Image: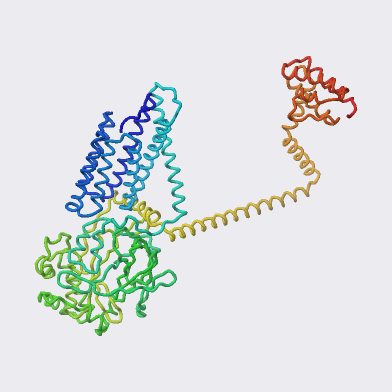
Amino acid sequence: MSASPHSANPMSEAIERYFEVALYLLVFVGFATLASTGGLEPVTVVLVSGALLFRGYSLISRRPRLLPERWTTPLTLGYALFYLADYFLISRTFLYPTVHLVLFIMLVRLFSARRDRDFYFLAVLSFLMLLAASVLTVDSTFLFAFAGFMLVGVITFILMEIRSSSARATVRAKPVADQSVAREMGVWLSAAAPGFVFFMLAAGAAIFFVLPRFSSTYLSAYVSNGAIATGFSDHVQLGQLGAIQQSSSLVMHIQIDGDQRGAYDLKWRGVTLNLFDGTSWSNPHEQHFVRRLGGRFIFPGQPNPSVVPSVIHYRVLMEPVASSVFFLAPTALTLEGNYQVVSTDAAGAVFDPDPEHPVSSYEARSDIATPSAAQLQNSSAEYPPDVLINDLQMPGSLDLRIARLAEQITVPETNNYDKASAIERYLRTNFKYTLQLPRSLNRDPLAVFLFDRKQGHCEYFASSMAVMLRTLGIPSRVVNGFRTGEFNDLTSQYLVRASNAHSWVEAYFPGYGWISFDPTPAAPAIGHSGWSRAMLYVDAMASFWREWIINYDLSHQHALGRQATQSVVDWLRLAHDWTRREYDALLAAARRSQQTISDAPLNWTLGALGTATLIILGANAQRIWRVVSRRRIAARPNRYPTTAATIWYRRSLHLLARKGFRKLPAQTPEEFLCSIADERFREPISRLTEYYERARFGASSEDAVRLPEVFEELSKLPRK
């Protein structure tokens, strides 16, 4: 960026330099915000960052290194050819080559900007990078990046307007040689910009909360789906869930009504899988739409009269993990949220089939009651036909040792519940839990897990138990979901991370339905430290950001309106109660005063008259003082000739008005004199005017003394 042609003095040079630095920082903040989302490849981040840092160094060292203008066109055309190679051979997608092209053009402009249009182009590109970052991230740190961008943007556009106005000006300011003036301008500009940003954010926040946003995808179609979506699809390969568990990224927040201490240890069901081919599980069930009634989706099913219900109401706030599955506590009864349609399958999994309204936040009710062990031990063995068909299937190549192992484990047991508990207990106590995945998937991974490796993660434990139950004729299936994570007592929310992903088993018991079993050994407990406590505060802030900024919609506005209305009603009730108390106290004081006055009426009457007199005198004290002062000055015109002249002239005008000669406000004293035709009045008014002007404007004491005499003479003349 070259210096402006109008830089003719230190002030102009300072404005130009401040503008170059501000525009550079605007571009730098825009790119840094985009890079922080993780949506750019590391190579692109390193190359562009290096170029930006080199440009910053040239600004600091005051050695501008600009590309010759004749180079810009060949460079751009050359990169257009590279763009084709990037699109067809390297990236093989549309998004990344286009981003590379835009960033290259930005760098070329940054190192060759000489005209105002180049500066405007760089400012627009900076904003587009910030806009792209807002699509790629929902993290609360974006707020700080956005505030920083606005701060630099305000300074940049103020300086841009100063430069533009200076270039259009026809009159040049006097050159200022003092360098301190330029530094002082920079200080004031830096001090004023945060105030502008604060008021802009405040006004934007007010508009934001009054005008809710509507669900739309915009550029979000370019955001890539995460691994979590594949781990909760209708076809899951053994090991996929273990890959998810190695990440500590946040998946969702869950808040259960009335839970302030983290008293629940629940599993949150995602997908249910019942078809096993030896290496992967799948779900062949068809989905059907759920009935909606009164804004709620009602799930089919009848409560078991032999089990006392235990219903909880909870709210789930999902991170953007690109999954269409609703994670619900068993057994789900209702679901609420900003969704047009919801579907479910025969296994009880709940899906969002509408891509225009992705899973973000929802409320649900579930009955978490479970039958007792005694009830399950006495359940019958008569299974429904559809359960026998769908949930006893086994792969044809199953290792025969698995069935024999199941028989050995359950030899002493006499009922299906005790058999399932025995297998669960055997896997928990004889195998180790690990997230170290096999380098390659074996042809028979369950046999390797049970008889060779004897360690694995939850998928292998759940799959082994489900298959062993099926060899015993007990219908079973695998459920993929999440365990309840860490509890944040600041927000009363459970933090569920990708590492909390889990697989467990459900076995069918006639009369009671599907019952959960978890054969996976407990993972080593993670100790809490002061740093983890500090991170809970960060999570509380991020949770507010996701809840009231990212997911703010019409339902949130209604909730905010209800809270505001309730607050106003409470405040009005308190104000009414306070007014009533004060009125009652005032009324009691009035009654006491009335009784006191009745006991001594004369004293109170004299006191009231005296008080009223003092109040009247106090209210008119200024007027009384003016009247007394005027009379004192009018009585001694020789001491205050100027003020006395004004007083006596005004008195004379009032007197003449009563006698039929009214002076208009627009008339001067001489013009008023000329308008008098009556000779009886003309001569004394002429002397009045002469004495007034000499005393008023000449401070003549002799003329001021004669004014009362003229006033007396005029008062003796008859009316016109």
The answer to which quarter of the image holds residue 507 is: bottom left
**Is residue 509 found left or right of 238 in the rendered image?**
right
- Tell which of 144 and 56 is nearer to you: 56
Above or below, 374 relative to 118 = below
- The colour mode here is rainbow
**Is residue 630 found left or right of 586 in the rendered image?**
right
The image shows residue 264 at horizontal and vertical percentages of 33, 65
- Tell which of 356 and 428 is nearer to you: 356
The image shows residue 120 at horizontal and vertical percentages of 35, 40
Task: Look at 25% across and 78% down and name the residue there.
Answer: 508
The image shows residue 529 at horizontal and vertical percentages of 28, 51
Task: Look at 27% across and 66% down and name the residue there.
Answer: 481
**Is residue 676 found left or right of 429 in the rendered image?**
right
- Does residue 312 appear in the picture of this structure? no
Task: Look at 45% across and 46% down and name the residue there.
Answer: 202
- Does residue 674 appear in the picture of this structure? yes
The answer to which quarter of the image holds residue 188 is: top left
- Quarter of the image with the C terminus in it: top right
